[in-house]
Image (cartoon, rainbow, N blue to C red):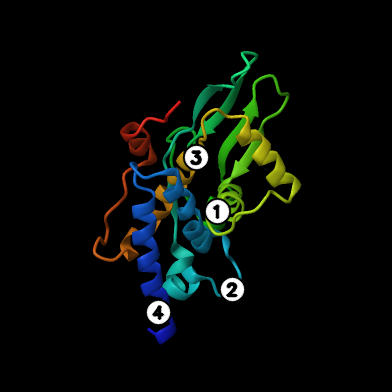
Amino acid sequence: MSDNEIAARELLGHILIELRQRTAADNSRYDVIRAAGLLRLLLVDRRAPTLLQDALGAEVDGLRFEVRTPVSVTVVGTGDGNGATILSRGLVPYDTETNTASLTLMEFCALEAAQIAVRGAQASESRSVDDVVRYAANVLGGVHYRQPKSAREKVTAELLASHDWDDLPWTLRDIAGVVLNALCSYEPESPGVVLKSSADFNAAVPPQT
């Protein structure tokens, strides 16, 4: 293993430890949003060589992201008495019979992470893992804090603003859980330990309405 690979593997280990700490069930919204910067580094920053390519070498091609979280729907009042906002929580599995899918990195990033809609609207807006991580990292303060720029970011901001309850941190926890499961053997001091499912996060700390 080269010096560069050793350094990348060490950095990956620190990132995984911090990601687990920041997305713990009892952590604040701030911690989870800051975790989006770590997820961006692992999933979204794709200029070769990526951190995962340097840290894992040829092993990166065999990396798989196991998705077991069934989708659930939360109905949240808009406060005007005229309707409700509907948001899907959890990751939509490809295999609807067993709720299990084994995905490559690119497949996981393209996977639908949320459906956002206002009741009465003719269509909902789908957001992928890539979308959610980029928005939280680039707009909400995970890495940068700025106003939405693209049309897609502006629609996301409008839809999230229509919620009385901010569901985005829960979606980020779902994403982090899948990532930590996939990379658990590279996490220092806890080889082979698999993170509990995001359903356990949700059960442990019910959302505040």
Under circle 3, the secondary element is loop
The numbered mark at residue 7 is 4
Q: Position of residue 188 (x, y in %)?
A: 28, 66
Q: Which residue is more in the foreground, 150 or 131?
A: 150
Dot placed on the residue nearer the N-terminal end, 4 or 2: 4
Q: Callout 2: helix, strand or loop?
A: loop
Q: Residue furthest bottom?
A: 3
- The answer to whether residue 2 shows anywhere in this view is no
Give the residue at x 42% y 71%. 56
How far is disc 1 from disc 3 in space, using C-alphas?
A: 23 Å
Neighbourhood count class around disc 4 (C-alpha, 10 Å): few under 14, some 14–19, many 20 upward? few
Image point (43%, 38%), residue name: 69
Which numbered circle lies on residue 91? 3
Report the front residue among 98 and 52: 52
Numbered tag placed on residue 48 in the rendering: 2
> What is the three-letter code of the residue carrying label 2?
Ala
Image vertical order of residue 124 relative to residue 49, above or below: above
Residues at marks 4 and 1, CA–CA distance in whole angstroms: 27 Å
* Mark before the other along the chain sequence, 3 or 4: 4
Q: Amino acid at mark 4?
A: Ala
Say which label, 1 or 3, has the lower sequence index: 3
Give above or below for 37 relative to 53: above
What's the residue at 75%, 45% (across, down)?
151
| Residue that protrudes farthest toward the left in the picture | 189
Q: At x 24% / y 64%, what residue is drawn? A: 189
**Earlier sequence position, callout 2 versus callout 1:** 2
Who comes first in sequence, dot 4 or dot 1?
4
Disc ID at residue 141? 1
Q: Is residue 62 above or below residue 58?
A: above
Distance of label 4 from label 2 (alpha carbons)? 16 Å
**Tag 3: amino acid:** Leu
Foreground residue among 161 and 168? 161
